Amino acid sequence: MSDRPRTVLVTGASGGIGAAVVTAFLRRGDNVAAHYCRADISARLADWRTNGRGRVAAFAADLTEPAAAGELVAAVAADFGPVDVLVNNAGAAWQGLLTEMSTAEWDYLFALNVRAAFLCAKAVIPAMTRRGQGWIINISSVWGLVGASCEAAYAATKGALLALTKSLAKELGPAGIRVNCVAPGVIDTAMNAGLDEAARAALRTATPLGLLGRPEDAAESAVFLASPAAGFFTGQTLSPNGGFVIY
C-alpha cells in the first residue's frame, strides 16, 4: 500500500452535512475532494484550506447526468490519486402530498439521491478492488428507516440507500471494501430551515435528548466508519438521532 494520504471524495459538499464531513476528514489529515453542483463554495473552500490538515479542492459536477459520476471520479484521481473513501452525501428533499408530486420531481430525487450514489460507487470500486481496501459511506436518513408523511419520495430514496449499503457490503466484503451508512435524525441544516419554530419545537420534544442534531454529529459518524476503530464494521447503519428513532 502507498504511504500517500487517503483521498476522500465527498459529494454534496456545499450543504451543511457535506461541509461538516469535509471538515472532519481534513482535520484528521486526509486529502478531500469536495464536490458541488451549482452553489458557490468559495468561502467554504478558503476556510477549509485555512483550518484543515489535509489538502482540499473543489470539483463541480451535475450528478443527475449519468456520465458525470465517472468523470468526477477520474478528475479526483488525476489530482489526488485514487479515491480511498467515498461519501455519497449529495441529495435533495421534496415535501408535499404524493398526489401533488410530478413524475419529473420523483425522477429527479431518485437520480440525485440514489442513482448518483450507485454511479459514484461503480466508478470507485475497480481501483478499490485492485488495492484490496476502500470505504463507501452512504448518507441516508431516519426517514429511510421509518418513513415520513409528506416526504414519501425522499424516504423512499433514503430507504434505497440502506438496501444498497447492505447489498454492496456483502458483494464487496471479500475485496476488503467496507460499505456502511449514516442515517441522521433531524439535523439543523438549510434543508430544514423552512420549518417554523413550532415545528422545530415539536421535533425537539419528540427527541428524547431534547435537541436538534448538528451537522458535525453526522460527520463524525462518517469519519468513524472510515477509521481503524470501525475495521469490523460493514453493512451497518449508524443513526445519530438523539433517540428520535430507536431500532
Image (cartoon, grey):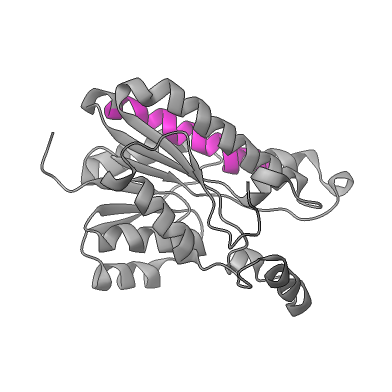
The part of the chain drawn in magenta is: 108-128
Please say if 49 is above or below 121: below
Depicted 99 relative to depicted 172: above or below: below
Q: Residue furthest bottom?
A: 197
Q: Nearer the viewer, residue 156 or 173?
A: 173
> At 30% from the left edge and 35% from the top edge, which residue is drawn?
134
Q: Nearer the viewer, residue 49 or 239?
A: 239
Give the quadrant of residue 219: bottom left
Query: Left or right of 15: which side holds 141?
Result: right
In reply to whether residue 71 is colored magenta, the answer given is: no
**Along the line of sight, which residue is nearer the eye, 228 or 219?**
228
In the rendered image, residue 123 lying in the magenta stretch gets the answer yes
* 128 sits left or right of 94 in the view: left
Residue 88 visible, this angle: yes
Magenta residues: mostly which secondary structure? helix
Percent x, y of residue 179: 42, 35
Q: Position of residue 79 (x, y in %)?
A: 23, 46
Quadrant where the N terminus sits is: top left
Location of residue 242 (image quadrant): bottom right
Across and down, in percent, residue 195 comes to 72, 71
x, y (%) of residue 101?
A: 82, 46
